Image: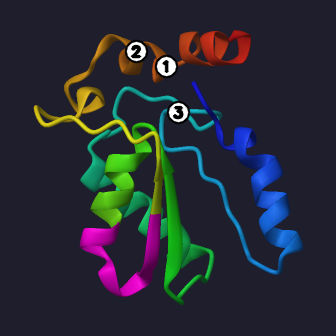
Amino acid sequence: MLSSRDFTDVVQLAVKQGYRAIAFDRPGYGYSERTKNVETTPISQANLIHKALIELGINEPIILVGHSWSGTMTLSCALQFSDKVAGIVILAGAMYKEGYPAERGDVISKVVITPILGNIILNTL
């Protein structure tokens, strides 16, 4: 599983080019807090990212980059907040016509968002 730290080099390259770059761990993934009450739908997580950007004082349209399961969340964010999105980039986006696996509680998502166990597995792998 990826965390925002996996994008440290890319963020630093963007900053050197004069851009402001931020990498988020989606709730329940990476190094974020794990709780069983995390809503994992692309729509709810797009809302959380949008709120975080507001709290950071980012008001101008941004370019969103989503990798893997964040690809669907990135599309959701672009659709919900089109006035705040200048563009999107989706890398190896996991798109499912039958729905979003994490939303239904697939095995991998259940394990990585489990308190304590999720931290152990992600930090070990």
Q: Horizontally, is 109 left or right of 31 in the view?
A: left
- Quadrant position of the C terminus in the picture: top right
> Which quadrant of the figure has residue 121?
top right
Which residue, as the protein is rendered here, is positioned at the far left? 98
Label 2 – label 1 distance at C-alpha: 6 Å
**Whole-percent x, y for residue 90 in the image:** 45, 53
In percent of the image, x 15 and y 35: which residue is there? 99
Instruction: Name the residue beneath numbered marker 3.
Output: 29
Instruction: Answer few, some or many: residues within 10 Å of disc 2's Cα (few below 14, many 20 plus, some between 14 and 19).
Output: few
Q: Horizontally, is 98 left or right of 72 in the view?
A: left
Is 86 inside the magenta-drawn segment?
yes
What's the magenta region? 78-88
Instruction: Name the residue beneath numbered marker 1.
Output: 112
* Above/below status of 49 relative to 26: below
* Above/below status of 86 relative to 4: below
Label 3 – label 1 distance at C-alpha: 7 Å
